Every structure is written in C-alpha cells, then in structure tokens.
Image (spheres, grey):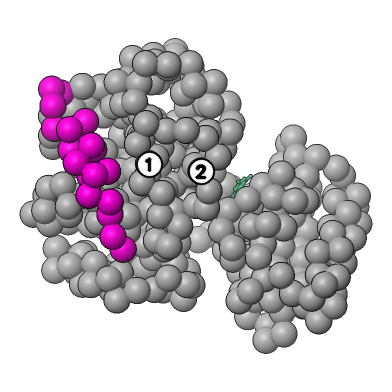
Amino acid sequence: MELDRDNISRLREMIEGEPCKITVVSHTNPDGDAIGSSLAWAHFLRTLGHTVECVVPNRYPYFLEWMPSIETLRIFKDDRNGETAAFISGSEIIFCLDFNCIARLEGLSEVILSNTTAKFVLVDHHLDPPQEYDLVFSHPECSSTSFLVYKMIEKLGGTASITKEMGESLFVGIMTDTGNFAFSNLTSDLFETVASLVRLGVDIPYVHSMVYNSFTVDRVKLLGYALNKMETIHAHGVGVAYITLLESELRRFHFQQGDSEGFVNYPLTVKDLQMSVIFIQTRNFIRVSLRSRGDVDVSRFAKIYFEGGGHRNASGGKSYKSMPETVAYFRKCVEEYFADGPR
Ligand code: 5GP
Ligand code: MN
C-alpha cells in the first residue's frame, strides 16, 4: 500500500499549521472500521493541538461500546441543542472517513455541505468517489480505512505517535472489515501492521472477544431464526441465497442496532452459493446488504438495482417497495443480472 507523496505533503501542510477546528465524520450505521478509523485519526489530530470532534449520523452497535474514547463520539441524531451542527459549521477541515459519497450521511449531509469554507479531505477504501474533495486518499485496494489511517499516521508522525488505545481502535477496523482476516487484499504489509499493533500492546484475543463474543441471547436466537428462513435460487449457474426480516420479526427478538451485523455472511459458508443478500425492514425502507465471493460483483448489482454500492464482494442499498414486492423484484434482477453468466 503506497501513499502518494504529494498528497502526504499537502496533508502535512494542512494539519501541521496553526491549531484549528476539525470535524472527522463517518457513515450512517457506523461499523467497526468507521468508528475505529475515526477515533484513532481524531486522537492523532488532537496531539497536533487541534480541536477535533468525531461525528456519526446515528448510533453505533452496542458491541463497540467498550472502545477507548468512544464516549467522545458525537451522534448527530442526538444533537438536540444544535451544538454538533454548530461545531461542524465552524470547522476549518472536514475529514470524511470510510465512505465517499456525502449522501451516505443521510440527515447529516445538509449540515456538512452547508459548510462551504472548510477544506474537505477524503480518507476511504470504497470504489470511485462520486464527488470532488480538496484532498483525496482513496484506496480501494486497502482492506479497511483503519489500515489506511495507520499508514497515514505512520508517514506523518511515525509509529511512536500511535498509542495502545489508538492501536486497539485501528485493530477493530482491520479485523471487522477483513471478516477476521478472511476476505481479500490480505497483504503482507497488513500483517506487518498487525505485528506492530501487537508490539504496542494490543491484545488480539481480548479485542476479538469484545467484538464477536458480546452478543445477547436474543441476538443469537434471531440469527438461528434468520438462517432458518434462508431461501436459495440458482440462476444461470450462480447460487444465490436471501433472507428477509420484517420489523415485526425483529421486535419479537428485541432487536437492537448491530444485532443483524454479519448475518449476511453465513449463507456463503455453503459451498455452492456465491451471493448472499439480506433484506431488513426499517421504518422508512428496506435495507439491503449483499455479499459475494470470487468474481460475482455485488457492488454493481447494488448500484443497478438498489440505489447503492460498496465493494465488489460487500455492498448495500435500499428498497422502498414492500417486502413481497422487493423479493419478487430481486428474483427478477438476479435472473437478468446473471443471464450472461457470472459477473
Ligand atoms: P453493509 O451491508 O455492511 O451495511 O455494507 C456493506 C458495504 O456496502 C459497506 O462497505 C458499505 O459502505 C456499502 N454500503 C452499504 N449501504 C450502502 C448504500 O446505501 N450506498 C452505498 N453506496 N454503499 C453502501
Ligand atoms: Mn470500511
């Protein structure tokens, strides 16, 4: 993973000057990578003397509650007195981490875009940023934004500027976005970074357990229920699984945000399935999560049919139809998408 030297010098100029107000923002339904990269990057900027706030549109899942300094994170949905909005409006730099399309900030987009004087810096690993930034660190070859942030801090301040707490935050992002080191782009460079995190004192079994073994009984029962509902389709030689979860079903299991995280991966443990999709009903729309392996490109699928996007093997989108209509539409899309073979 190589960082562009000119980009690093421009970033250095931007952050090594007078102390200023900086917002670090990440995406809706923030995951381990969004939170991990934001907390570590904000911490680094604070050591340079800046006043920094990390903002996310809505709450993070409960299994990240233990993360160091997570109490400093501002949740825009809870910004009743407008304090967070005011901070964003007065920021001189806005770092956008782990997403590349401002629309993914939903209700927060307006406040972010109303600041027309701040410098906007993108730090992300999703494909094709759809809009302009003043400075862009866009690395789709990078398995997580947290790994990218590690490399940036290493270049800017050396490894000595990374504390154990920052290391834990970064490891959460690295571990969760690689599916616990199972997905693509697992470079030797990544494992060298993990080795240096271990040297900082990051306790891998501890972090792993805090994230993956912290669920409720209801969550585990909901997983069993969801897997029992799995349906499969075979379209032109491609095996596809899908699961639907209605709000009423979620309520039965006292659903909390984050409970369905990872469900979509389980169908891919079946040998002849290459694509897995979960449809989760929310108040205003159905959230679609897609995963695939190998050549099957779910990012394109999400973009064409579900107003979404993401990575080749992990993407998301939305449906504004009812659940039965969404499923009928999805089955037609699968048929059409794979008509010329896997793609
Ligand atoms: P998840 O299924 O975990 O919510 O999301 C998987 C991937 O798809 C993530 O990398 C996320 O950034 C991307 N993604 C999820 N929802 C959307 C969406 O509505 N639009 C776009 N462009 N990407 C999404
Ligand atoms: Mn990520």
Question: Is 244 situated left or right of 36 in this image?
Answer: right
The magenta-colored residue range is 1-19
Residues at badges 2 and 1 in contact (C-beta under 8 Å)?
yes
Tell me what residue is drawn at x 52 percent, y 52 percent: 127
The percent coordinates of residue 285 (x first, y second) are: 75, 40
Q: The residue under label 1 is which amino acid type?
A: Val
Q: The residue under label 2 is which amino acid type?
A: Pro
Q: Give the labeled residue for mark 2.
A: 129
Q: Is residue 240 shown above or below 92?
A: below
Question: Which mark, residue 136?
Answer: 1
User: How dense is the environment of label 1, judged by Cα within 10 Å: few (below 14), some, or many (20 and up)?
Assistant: some
Q: Is residue 206 shown above or below 87?
A: below
Question: Is 340 situated left or right of 325 in this image?
Answer: left
Question: Which mark, residue 115?
Answer: none
Sequence-first tag of 2 and 1: 2
The percent coordinates of residue 11 (x first, y second) are: 23, 38
Residue 159, image quadrant: bottom left
The residue at the far front in this view is: 6
The percent coordinates of residue 342 (x first, y second) are: 74, 74
- Can residue 100 be found in the magenta stretch? no
Question: Is 260 situated left or right of 144 in this image?
Answer: right
Q: Is residue 172 visible?
A: no
Q: Is residue 334 shown above or below 236?
A: above
